[in-house]
Amino acid sequence: MLSALLHRRRRLLPVLALVVLAEPILAIFGPGYAADGAATLRLLALAGIPFAVVNLAFIRLRLERRVGVIVVIQIALAVSLVGSTAVLIPQLGVVAIGVVTLLTQSIAAAILARAELGPLFAGFVRTGRGSESPLQRLDLRAVDDDPRPINR
């Protein structure tokens, strides 16, 4: 348990570094650039967290050969990202890109985590005595017993 927590911390370290050091990093390009872009860089760094969840769901969908679902989700993300940015840029400026990216990725991550990733983790939540997880119910012997080679 402790090692898993430490591993998660190491993965969040770059995100936290970008959030904290956004302005000094962008100051390399000038003080005006740093002042204008720091908030956007912070929001885009935070958007990396839900982006990882979305990509995890995409990996599962690819493994299940449900590429059509990926295409529909990517189109929905693109349309919502471009459309919302076009609406919000007059009010927020360049920060609109970060706000919209964080919001669209978070919404997509919440939906995909529930719909696609939820069944994977359902067995890790205790549901009572004698219940087994979906991972325990998998019958992998059928896969291993097939003597035919895999030809691709």
Image: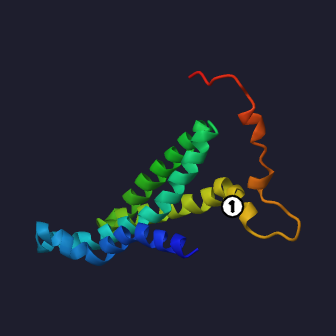
Residue type at the position of mark 1: Phe
Q: Residue at 82% across / 69% down in the picture?
A: 127
Relative to 21, say whether 81 is above or below.
Answer: above
Relative to 114, say whether 68 is above or below.
Answer: above
- Count the labels in the image: 1
Q: Residue at 44% across / 55% down in the picture?
A: 81
For residue 62, what is the image quadrant?
A: top right
Mark 1 Cα-neighbour bin, 10 Å: few <14, some 14–19, many ≥20 = few
Q: Name the residue nearer the viewer: 148 or 46.
A: 148
Q: Residue at 29% across / 65% down in the picture?
A: 94
Relative to 40, say whether 55 is above or below.
Answer: above
Judge left or right: residue 2 versus residue 29.
right
Return the x and y of residue 25 as percentages of the image width and height. Answer: 20, 70
Q: Which quarter of the rendered picture does the N terminus lie within?
A: bottom right
Tell me the residue that label 1 is attached to: 121
The outermost residue toward the right is 130
Return the x and y of residue 138 as percentages of the image width and height. Answer: 77, 47
Secondary structure at badge 1 equals helix
For residue 102, what is the image quadrant?
A: bottom left
Judge left or right: residue 88 versus residue 24.
right
For residue 72, what is the image quadrant?
A: top right
Return the x and y of residue 30 as percentages of the image width and height. Answer: 10, 70
Q: Residue at 41% across / 70% down in the picture?
A: 10
Task: Look at the image and name its color scheme.
Answer: rainbow
Can residue 69 be seen by looking at this rendering? no
Can residue 103 be seen by looking at this rendering? yes
Return the x and y of residue 128 as percentages of the image width and height. Answer: 86, 71
